[in-house]
Image: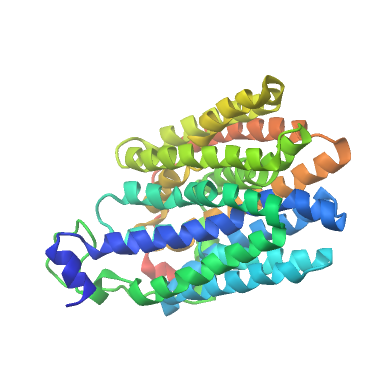
Amino acid sequence: MSLASYLARRSLHYGWLVAGLTFIALLVAAGIRSAPGVLIVPLEQEFGWTRATISLAISINLVLYGLIGPFAATLMERIGISRTMVFALAFLAVGVGLTTLMSASWQLVLLWGIIVGSGTGIIALVLGAVVVNRWFSQQRGLVLGVLTASTATGQLVFLPILASLVEHFGWRVATLTLSGVALLVIPLIAIFMRDRPSQVGLRPFGDKSETAEVLQPRANSIASTLRLLWLGMRQRDFWLLFGSFFICGASTNGLIGTHLIPACVDHGIPEVKAAGLLAVMGLFDFVGTTLSGWLSDRWNNRYLLCWYYGLRGLSLIFLPFSFDLSFYGLSVFAVFYGLDWIATVPPTVRLTANVFGKENVGVMFGWIVAGHQLGAATAALGAGALRTWLGSYLQAFILSGVLCLIAAVLVLRIGQRPNNSQLSPAQLHP
């Protein structure tokens, strides 16, 4: 009996297994992605590299994380989701493992910046969007919310462990642990992951149609991916989505995900305790992002984004002053900010699908995620440089908070003109 038949006899759609495997892969990639926050201080102490130098490698990582996304969507169409995930996990395992041998800053840029950045870019938010749109006709927002929350869960699971390993055994043991976990996930993906419901004789979850799934011909080339970008750039809504997600990245991965632990160390808070703070934020973000997915199926997504960015901006403006309130002030920030960390993703995916069409959501959301990561890279490098030059993160936190308040206004304009942005398959062929 096949696994699909076994699950069907228990009234469980195979799509839930696919979603579970995707969650695990995203969780591991998120754990790897969040590791630099724990590694900055040890690398600074061992090699004498400045935070600006280390932040340069992290910013390159974040840029590639974003720019790879649209082409990852194309790669998934070409060779399948399963093969793409196996390749990316293997790439990550090798890249992370080799960092234990580095002795110069250019090697950090090559390994953690380019190799790890490319690998995490393949297993990123775009993967979740593609899986959800292929395997689910109902509960899309909820499932995407859970998959997006894997980023938070990755922090929750990995950061305290990594910080403890760094403290007791050194940063090399911590990175080897990450490499080993990535290798362990590969067999699960290779054996059980499926690209489409039709491969196991099913329709997407919630699709009551009895007709066979018809696969639409797609132009799966780099040229078609770039053509979609060109068509999108001619629409105002693309720039509103791109710009707001740029600010989202600048205020999350680039700033808090990278620099909160070093900022805590600057204020006398031990690294393990600071990593625990990020883990608490991850726990609350899992709740907030899952709830956001549920809400995105029911409420106006523009208004949701307005609330998310507005509340995040206020919390970031409060952050520099929370250090003066001891660790309890940071705990208040962690709960408040954590609920909002990446709750922006489900409504942004929904708006992208509404504007550009379901069949284009993978590639177009990939380009919008590129904006997210360009923002993250700018904040990672900029905050590191400000800390090096001014000796404080105050200006970086305040500036990021103000940008979030600007984004809260921008997102209200999305979709306010007649929707003429839908891209038909014919437009993909010059």
Farthest top residue?
325
Query: Residue 76 in the image: x percent, y percent?
Result: 44, 72
Q: Is residue 360 left or right of residue 391?
A: left
**Residue 409 occupies which quadrant of the picture?**
top right
Q: Is residue 294 left or right of residue 65?
A: left
Query: Residue 155 in the image: x percent, y percent?
Result: 54, 48
Q: Is residue 127 visible?
A: no
107 and 273: which one is in front? 273
Residue plotted at (11% across, 67% down) = 210
Query: Residue 418 in the image: x percent, y percent?
Result: 39, 44
Q: Is residue 324 above or below residue 20?
A: above
**Residue 273 occupies which quadrant of the picture?**
top right
261 and 120: which one is in front? 261
Q: Is residue 193 above or below residue 208?
A: below
Residue plotted at (39% across, 71% down) = 188
Q: Is residue 306 left or right of residue 132?
A: right
Q: Is residue 55 visible?
A: yes
111 and 326: which one is in front? 326
Q: Quadrant of the N terminus?
A: bottom left
Residue plotted at (81% across, 67% down) = 106
Q: Is residue 145 left or right of residue 249?
A: left
Question: How many numbered callouts?
Answer: 0
Residue plotted at (52% across, 36% down) = 338
Query: Residue 363 in the image: x percent, y percent?
Result: 47, 63
Farthest front residue?
168
Q: Is residue 48 above or below residue 266?
A: below
167 and 306: which one is in front? 167
